[in-house]
Amino acid sequence: MIKLISNIIFVIAVLILLKTWYNIYEVVMRHYKKFGVRILITVILCMITIVSLIAPIYLLCYLKILLPAVPVEYIKLQSAFFAIIAVLINRFIAIKAKNAAVDYCLKKGILTKTGI
């Protein structure tokens, strides 16, 4: 039963991660006119997304070391919870970064409201 719950949590984490990436890159996918701007925004958002996924995983691994010994059957469940926490942190940071990038581009006139 614990394996099933762990696997379901991992699947949910992957689905949340895919939905996050779609939400971030839909702005870039819909804006067709300025190719260089799209590439620049995509590269910046990719870097932010990757760093905001790696950093929580790295920190949560240290938290796992600091936690007291967990029985063997609960290790996968603990890892699943750490994975979903890292994905939710990534979602929060990445969507905030996307909104900030779009606001900056709108303010500078790089993008227009009709392009978004």
Image (tube, helix red, strand yellow):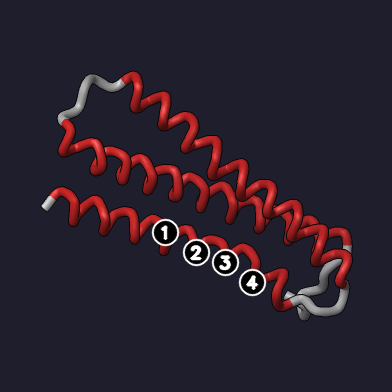
Q: Secondary structure at mark 1?
A: helix
What is the total number of numbered labels drawn onto the structure image?
4
Q: Residue at label 1?
A: 14
Q: Nearer the viewer, residue 111 or 45?
A: 45
Quick one: label 4 or label 2, which is nearer the N terminus? 2
Q: Residue at label 2?
A: 18
Residue type at mark 2: give it: Leu
Q: Residues within 10 Å of mark 1 (few under 14, many from 20)?
A: some
Residue type at mark 1: give it: Val
Vertical arrangement, residue 94 with respect to residue 21, above or below: above
Q: Are marks 2 and 3 in contact (CB under 8 Å)?
A: no
In the picture, measured across the screen, residue 92 lies left or right of residue 78, that is right
Q: Secondary structure at mark 2?
A: helix
Q: Report the Cα–Cα distance between label 1 and label 4.
A: 18 Å
Q: Residue at label 4?
A: 26
Vertical arrangement, residue 33 with respect to residue 50, above or below: below
User: Disc 2 or disc 3, which is closer to the eye?
Assistant: 2
Residue type at mark 3: give it: Asn
Quick one: label 2 or label 3, which is nearer the N terminus? 2
Q: Are marks 3 and 4 in contact (CB under 8 Å)?
A: yes
